Amino acid sequence: MDDDAMRELVHRERFSPNYDERNAAISMVVIHYTEMEGPDAAIERMTDPEAKVSAHYLISEAGEVTRLVPEEKRAWHAGVSYWRGESDVNSVSIGIELDHPGHAHGYRAFADPQIAALVPLLNAIVKRHDVPRANVVGHSDVAPQRKIDPGELFPWARLADLGLCLPRPTRLELGDPFDNDGSFYLAMERFGYDITDGRKAVEAFQRRWRPELIDGEIDGEIRAILFQLLLDRDRGLAR
């Protein structure tokens, strides 16, 4: 997608001073919610130099896309984070903030116009930077000890149906493949998660892959889901 087409997806620009230079190529997209009451408050915070936070894009619940930081720059959205061996997630990622009250202000389903705006924007980003589906993640995936956004109601399945992120495995080949919790944690780390806080890592995994039950407990279903994700990746089916 060329620059003109990309500009058609962006409704306005409000550039933030909160960025610096990248030191690596873009290979990820991280999706957040703002957990604030309205897009204007979120934009004010992300353009406040004292706040030292930002993102590349903000999408309002009405579907308006605001560009805050040029993609070639390193926005400050992920904080202390980790994914698949990368500990400087900000340097390798595009950050997209979704205007949403979050869990602090009345968690609810994401607005249809917002997701309708996210889909073409995300599609343009992943195509332009050749981002693997496995690297389109939520903030909770890359910072499980600190974050729970975008949360259990985010429509990952809708994005997966469009080829924009990995789908939840539905064909679970070997049932319960891990002998003990330690082997499950090691497999989570192999898949990409920071397992420093095991329970929080499990909650993050559940939030993304089995959102109907998030309890931090390792059970047969999530063991089977993780094993299938790893099988698919090893077979080259999970890029």
Image (cartoon, helix red, strand yellow):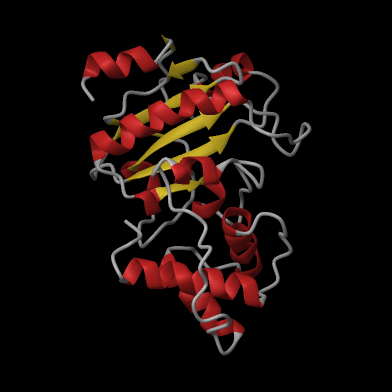
Residue ranking furthest to the bottom:
179
Residue 13 picture quarter = top left
Residue ranking furthest to the left:
2
Residue 107, percent across and down? 74, 36
Of the pair 200 and 134, the residue shown nearer to us: 134
Q: Assign the C terminus to one quadrant of the image.
A: bottom left
Residue ranking furthest to the top:
12
Q: Is residue 217 left or right of residue 67?
A: right
Image point (54%, 18%), residue name:
63
Q: Is residue 8 left or right of residue 3?
A: right
Residue 142, percent across and down? 49, 53
Q: Is residue 69 above or below residue 23?
A: above
Image point (54%, 45%), residue name:
156
Of the pair 207 and 44, the residue shown nearer to us: 207
Residue ranking furthest to the right:
106
Q: Is residue 87 left or right of residue 156?
A: left
Image point (57%, 50%), residue name:
140
Image point (66%, 32%), residue name:
35
Q: Is residue 12 above or below residue 85?
A: above
Q: Assign the N terminus to one quadrant of the image.
A: top left
Q: Is residue 235 left or right of residue 60?
A: left
Residue 134, percent across and down? 39, 54
Query: Can residue 88 be seen in this snapshot?
Result: no
Residue 173, percent across and down? 49, 77
